Amino acid sequence: MRKVFSFAFFGVALVFVSLNASSLERQSGADYHVRRQALAKKAGGVVLLFAPLEGNDAVFGFRQDENFYYLSGITEPGAALLIAPAAEAKGDSPASPYIEILFLPPHNLRAEKFTGPKLGAENPDAAKITGFDRVEEMEKLPDEVSKAIGGGRPVIYTELASQGEPAAASEPLAFLKRTNAFLFFQDVKPILASLRTVKDDGEAALIRKAVDASAAAHLAAMKGVKPNVKEFEVSALMQYEWGRRGCERPSYSPIVGSGHNSTVLHYSDNSNAMKAGDVVVIDAAGEFSMYAADITRTLPVNGHFTPRQREIYDIVLGAQEAAMAAFQSGKSMLSGDSETSLNRVARDYIKSHGKDLHGQPLDQYFIHGLGHYIGLNVHDFGDYKVPLAPGMAFTIEPGIYIPEENIGVRIEDDYLVDADGKLIKLSASLPSKAEDVEKAMKN
């Protein structure tokens, strides 16, 4: 395939997905504009981000980079955005206005025969469609970067590659470095993590939709779990249920682990037939317009917990409820072992409420953290060093996994702290008490 400048700039041929063709529920352009302004102000300098490319053989589809989508709402592969804060005149440096530019790749007419017409910078409505102040051709990016830097510090905030992981910016940044040896790059991810910690109202609404669809899928699973049913059948049922409610894909690889596999934290083969007398841990949820839910329920395969299974189940549920009861907006921490840590509350509850077959406390079988943020990723960017406060969305998911007894129990729900500091259980419609789970399985 012939390469023009911008293709060579990225090093490979491009295949694009049109913004207009996206089925995602995009927030208003003003919401993304506010985020770009906040990032520019917090960074205090030029920010340059690149959307990843779509492979020539996009069998599994394309999902936009989360940070790029957070700032733009744009699903186009191969796009780029440049932002810089307004600056007052200092010394010989003149004042400069706030800058935000979206760069779009040139049309690839051959690819568009396969994927449909694409939005280009030549479209007179491109700025209105995308919500950016300016939309330009990709070939103008190097010049605009030079203008944005001007006589100031030659530092660009961008997404640098993490160890062992490639970054969409690697090749274009290398090109910029070759054209301007005095450029320096600084990782923007910590700043974005702090911004993404608190969700705005639009984000909260999308998370709610993901949770509602996922809760409906779990309810269907409660009715579908029976002895001799394959684990993958339950996974398929759930993906159908949240898919028909608007979720584009799973938030993560669904986990349906029965028997001994209920004690394996990230078991995802989902290949066994479920057996009467076992429990099954179902950790599965959908993604709605890029926003993830994360829900887990533990079910008795034959519809009734044994006394020992019920004992473990009630301890896990008690730990979750203890963490919920201890929550204080602006004070509680999700992780850690401080006096304000919900993680510590849950662990102390488990330690004091049961024993294994050898008389040892059960907290040794709680082998993961109590929870994590949710949002554009199921384990979302966020600052875990700050207290939980309004706008934060997260899970509370205590668990006990005892391989010796083939009993694994995890109960996971999604939460949001509302504007008044109240803890809202987003997945409250889904049964969690043991008797209610058994009743749902019976109906």
Image: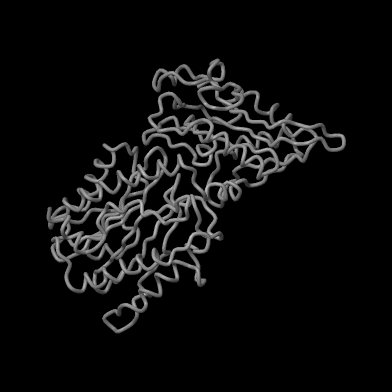
Horizontally, residue 333 falls left or right of residue 435, namely: right
Q: Position of residue 376 (x, y in %)?
A: 45, 44
Residue at horizontal 34 percent and vertical 76 percent from the top: 362
Q: Closest to the observer: 377 or 443?
A: 443
Horizontally, residue 332 falls left or right of residue 38, namely: left
Q: Position of residue 303 (x, y in %)?
A: 14, 60
Compared to 361, does 243 lie above or below? Answer: above
Residue at horizontal 69 percent and vertical 31 percent from the top: 145
Q: Position of residue 417 (x, y in %)?
A: 45, 53
Horizontally, residue 61 falls left or right of residue 105, namely: left
Q: Residue furthest bottom?
A: 359
Compared to 31, does 374 lie above or below? Answer: below
Horizontally, residue 372 falls left or right of residue 132, namely: left
Compared to 124, does 131 lie above or below? Answer: below
Q: Quadrant of residue 9?
A: top right
Residue at horizontal 27 percent and vertical 63 percent from the top: 262
Q: Closest to the observer: 6 or 419?
A: 419
Q: Position of residue 80 (x, y in %)?
A: 58, 31
Picture colour scheme: one colour
